[in-house]
Each structure stands twice: as structure tokens, then as C-alpha cells.
Amino acid sequence: MASSVWLRRAAVLSRALNWISTPKPVLSCISNNGLVFQTASYNPKPLRLSLREPYIPDKESESTPEWQKTARYDRKLYGRYGSASGIDPASLWPTPEELDKIIAEENEWYPTLEVMRQNIAAREKEETEKRLAKEKLITANMAKMPKMIADWRREKREAKVKLKEEKARRSKLLAEARERFGYNVDPRSPKFLEMVAEIEKEEKKKKKLLKRRQREEQATVLVTPPSASS
């Protein structure tokens, strides 16, 4: 049975090779204008196929391409022809360095199911911790909100009072400068600035004297003994 199939395949292949190698005649045709066109046929060289022996490249030959001298091509030959390729199967096994690299790549890109489950659990735990921390921060800020609002309102009132006091002080200084110089003085003029510096110096001196007097009065109260009871 197998021999008959082999013979039929060989016959078909032989007829195909004979048809390819047979020279084709030159075809001629005459057009309506009387011109003659000739079409030359192509006679390819017959294919020389070896159906009995596999093609094994010679690695020692310089004409052999470099890609046919690689271990990858050896694996391909052994997978196609088996022991007929003349390749030692032990030489096709990866080296320890290549094996370590393959294992590392598999561990990185193709983790086991247990590792994937652990990674998912760790990621979910991290996301839960971030969410709880954010909720805790929001709760703490909400608890501080009444105090923050009260502080903001107090600072706003103090700034308003301070601005009012600054305006009153400025008006008072301008009035005093007008009384001293007899005309309205520009607040940016050296005379006005010199007067302000002098007034501030006098105020600091008065504050010092007031603090000293208060300390002296407190010291007098502490030293004076209480009156004897009758």
C-alpha cells in the first residue's frame, strides 16, 4: 500500500519536472495592422531534488550562511529529520545560563495562579488601605471644620479692626501734621515720615515708662506688709 502511494507521487513529480524542463515553442501572432508579434518562451533549468537524503548544511564551509550554523537551525533540523540530521540531541538542550534566563522570564511574564492570586490580594489590600486613610483624613478635617471656620472669622474680624485702626491712626497723623506745619502734608514726603518716626519714638518711650511704673507698683505691693488686725 505504502509503496504504491510512493510510486504515484514519484510519477506525478516526474511529469511535473518534465513539463517544466521541456522547451516551449515561440508563439507568433499577426495583428490587424499586419505586424507580427513573437513571444519567447522561458525554459527554466530542471530542479534537482534529492528525495532520499535530507539537506544538512556543512558548517565548516564558508559558503554556508551563518544562520544555518546556529543552534536554532540545528533544533529545526532535528525536529524535521530526527537522528538523520546527525545532530546530537544533548547539544540542543539550553545551557544553565539560558535555562536560568528562560525560568526568570517565565516567572516574570507567566506567573503561577497562586502568585497571581497573591498579587491581586496585595493590590486590593493596598487600595483598601489608601481608601481608609483618605476617609480618615476627610473625617479628621470635617471634625476640625467648625474650629477652622471660627478661626477664619476671628482673623477676618481682627484684620478688619486692624485696618480700621490703621485708618484712624493715619487720619490722626495727617491732622497732627497739618496742625504742626500749617498745611496739608503729603504722607510720602520726608517731613511727614520724619514726624511719624519721631511720634513712634515718643510712643515707645512712653510705653517703657508705663511698664517701669507698673513693675515698681507691683514691687511696692509685694514689699508692703499687711496692716495688723485690731
Image (spheres, grey):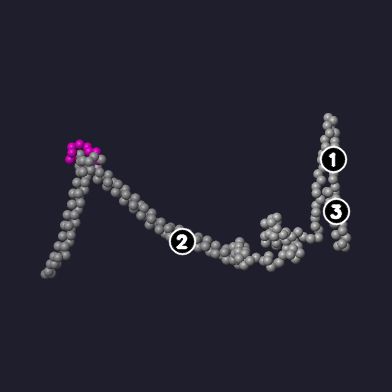
Residue at x 84% of width, y 54% of height: 13
* Between marks 1 and 3 in the image, the one whose residue lies nearer the viewer: 1
Disc with the residue nearer the chain's start (1 vs 3): 3
SS for dot 2: helix
Image quadrant containing the C terminus: bottom left
Q: Nearer the viewer, residue 203 or 143?
A: 203
Q: Position of residue 34 (x, y in %)?
A: 85, 30
Q: Which amino acid does the dot numbered 2 rest on?
A: Lys
* Between marks 2 and 1 in the image, the one whose residue lies nearer the viewer: 1
What residue span does the magenta drawing correspond to? 179-187
| Residue 180 lies in the magenta-colored region | yes
* Between marks 2 and 3 in the image, the one whose residue lies nearer the viewer: 3
Left or right of 229? Residue 135 is right
**Residue 26's mark?**
1
SS for dot 1: loop
Q: Nearer the viewer, residue 198 or 4?
A: 4
**Residue 136's mark?**
2
Q: Nearer the viewer, residue 99 or 104?
A: 99
Residue at x 79% of width, y 60% of height: 53
What's the distance in space between the residues labelled 2 and 3, CA to CA?
86 Å
Image quadrant containing the N terminus: bottom right
What's the distance in space between the residues labelled 1 and 3, CA to CA?
24 Å
Disc with the residue nearer the chain's start (2 vs 1): 1
Residue placed under numbered mark 3 in the picture: 14
Left or right of 226? Residue 124 is right
Residue at x 82% of width, y 35% of height: 37
Q: Which amino acid does the dot numbered 1 rest on?
A: Val
Q: Position of residue 66 (x, y in %)?
A: 67, 57
Q: Position of residue 150 (x, y in %)?
A: 36, 55
Q: Position of residue 229 (x, y in %)?
A: 13, 69
Q: Which amino acid does the dot numbered 3 rest on?
A: Ser
Q: Quadrant of residue 78?
A: bottom right
